[in-house]
């Protein structure tokens, strides 16, 4: 359309109370109708459903357990490693709360009469694929330029998709290490950089987010042709443009979080358990292939184990929260219920957001040719 979308990016750091406050404040002042988070559909349960109180309880329990030196490490080595281990536990369980705070502020914000329905895009690459990259090429591969550029491009696909839906105010909450890549890909897609601020500018009132959004909405695009070609530059129809949750889906996630908080006792959240025996087979003499271990490999499903497999979050909690091995089933149920969508096509996203419940059955969506869309039978890639 003829309107201009204002995209406000917020760079956040892990385990930073300042980042949490900034993300929530920007959402409050920008009054967006669309929100992008640097999460993926596999991390919905962990970061958007599991209550903050439960995350804090697990972190504190694990820290207390680690302080007892459960492995009996020599005192000198234990003291040297204790501080680092304590920081790692806090970061593991309390490290990405800025996304949850931004979402909470977004859900609570009142909807004005002429606003489009709220929508959230989980724009990051899937965590399982990032973990596969890390295992095959090492930890540094995640911070090298190809991976950072790939993730930045993936996030911009989500931002541009939200803009094509007609949302005039969009907020994106991304890791500060990815922020530069996201900005670069936005400019390649025809966006125009209007204002740059740091956290102190916002906290001390030197910049007004609301005024910046209004001026951006009134500005002309930097490159009209570039904006029109954005779907081709970003590979729409070839790779996933994001995972989307509508207004009803946000309400469902909110209710699920409240139910977990109400019905789960903190003392039942973490259980002690015995680590699995690790059976070592020296040589397989009589047949090819692996030798199945004894009965230790059989039994009831295991929960999320941590701290040397001595602590566990029970599987029934993981299922209720849609975490870990239950994440695919949880996301599939959201898609089936019409609360969420994964797509490569901007036209399919528009159709779904407008209430098109039979989109999958139709197979073809209005305007596929205009977006250069590929057929819907491609394997999902993000």
Image (cartoon, rainbow, N blue to C red):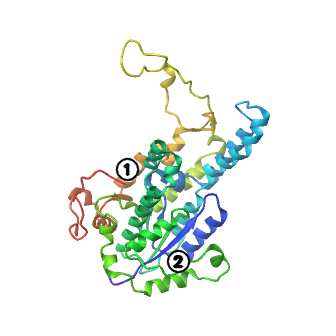
Image-based side of 91 in relation to 347, left or right: right
Q: Are marks 2 and 1 in contact (CB under 8 Å)?
A: no
Q: Quadrant where the N terminus lies?
A: bottom left
Image-based side of 29 in relation to 60, left or right: left
Using the image as rendered, state which of residue 214 and residue 255 is in the foreground. Answer: 214
| Residue 118 seen in the current view | no
Question: Residue 33 occupies which quadrant of the picture?
Answer: bottom left
The nearer-to-camera label among 2 and 1 is 2
Q: Which residue is mark 2?
A: 30
Position above or below: 118 against 377: below
Q: Quadrant where the C terminus lies?
A: bottom left
Label 1: how many Cα within 10 Å (few below 14, some 14–19, many 20+): some
Q: Earlier in the sequence, mark 2 or mark 1?
A: 2
Question: Residue 24 occupies which quadrant of the picture?
Answer: bottom right
Where is residue 173 drawn, in percent x and y? 52, 66
Where is residue 211 drawn, in percent x and y? 54, 85
Point out which mark residue 233 bears.
Answer: none
Question: Residue 67 occupies which quadrant of the picture?
Answer: top right
Q: Which residue is mark 1?
A: 332
Give the farthest residue toward the top: 286
Query: Residue at (42%, 16%) from the top-left corner?
Result: 284
Label 2: how many Cα within 10 Å (few below 14, some 14–19, many 20+): many
Where is residue 301 drawn, in percent x and y? 49, 33
């Amino acid at each position: 359309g003829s309107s201009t979308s204002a995209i406000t990016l917020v760079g956040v750091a892990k385990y930073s109370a300042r980042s949490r406050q900034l993300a929530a404040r920007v959402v409050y002042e920008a009054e967006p109708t669309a929100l992008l988070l640097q999460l993926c559909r596999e991390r919905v349960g962990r970061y958007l459903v599991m209550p903050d109180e439960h995350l804090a309880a697990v972190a504190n329990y694990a820290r207390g357990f680690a302080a007892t030196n459960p492995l009996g490490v020599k005192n000198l080595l234990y003291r040297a490693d204790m501080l680092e281990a304590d920081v790692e536990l806090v970061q593991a369980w309390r490290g990405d709360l800025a996304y949850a705070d931004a979402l909470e502020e977004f859900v609570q914000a009142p909807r004005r009469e002429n606003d489009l329905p709220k929508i959230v895009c989980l724009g990051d690459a899937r965590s399982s694929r990032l973990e596969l990259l890390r295992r095959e090429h090492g930890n540094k591969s995640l911070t090298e330029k190809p991976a950072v550029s790939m993730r930045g491009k993936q996030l911009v696909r989500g931002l541009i998709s939200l803009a094509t839906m007609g949302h005039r105010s969009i907020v994106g909450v991304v890791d500060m290490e990815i922020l530069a890549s996201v900005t670069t890909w936005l400019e390649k897609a025809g966006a125009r950089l209007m204002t740059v601020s740091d956290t102190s500018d916002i906290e001390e009132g030197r910049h007004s987010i609301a005024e910046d959004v209004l001026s951006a909405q009134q500005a002309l695009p930097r490159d009209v042709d570039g904006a029109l070609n954005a779907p081709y530059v970003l590979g729409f129809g070839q790779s996933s443009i994001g995972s989307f949750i509508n207004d009803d889906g946000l309400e469902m996630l909110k209710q699920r979080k409240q139910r977990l908080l109400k019905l789960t006792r903190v003392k039942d959240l973490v259980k002690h358990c015995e680590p699995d025996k690790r059976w070592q087979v020296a040589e397989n003499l009589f047949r090819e292939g692996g030798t199945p271990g004894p009965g230790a490999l059989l039994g009831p499903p295991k929960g999320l184990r941590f701290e040397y497999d001595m602590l566990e979050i029970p599987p029934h909690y993981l299922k209720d929260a849609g975490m870990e091995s239950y994440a695919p089933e949880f996301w599939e149920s959201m898609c089936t219920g019409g609360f969420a969508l994964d797509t490569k096509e901007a036209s399919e996203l528009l159709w779904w957001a407008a209430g098109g419940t039979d989109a999958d059955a139709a197979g073809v969506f209005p305007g596929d040719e205009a977006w250069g869309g590929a057929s819907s039978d491609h394997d999902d890639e993000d």
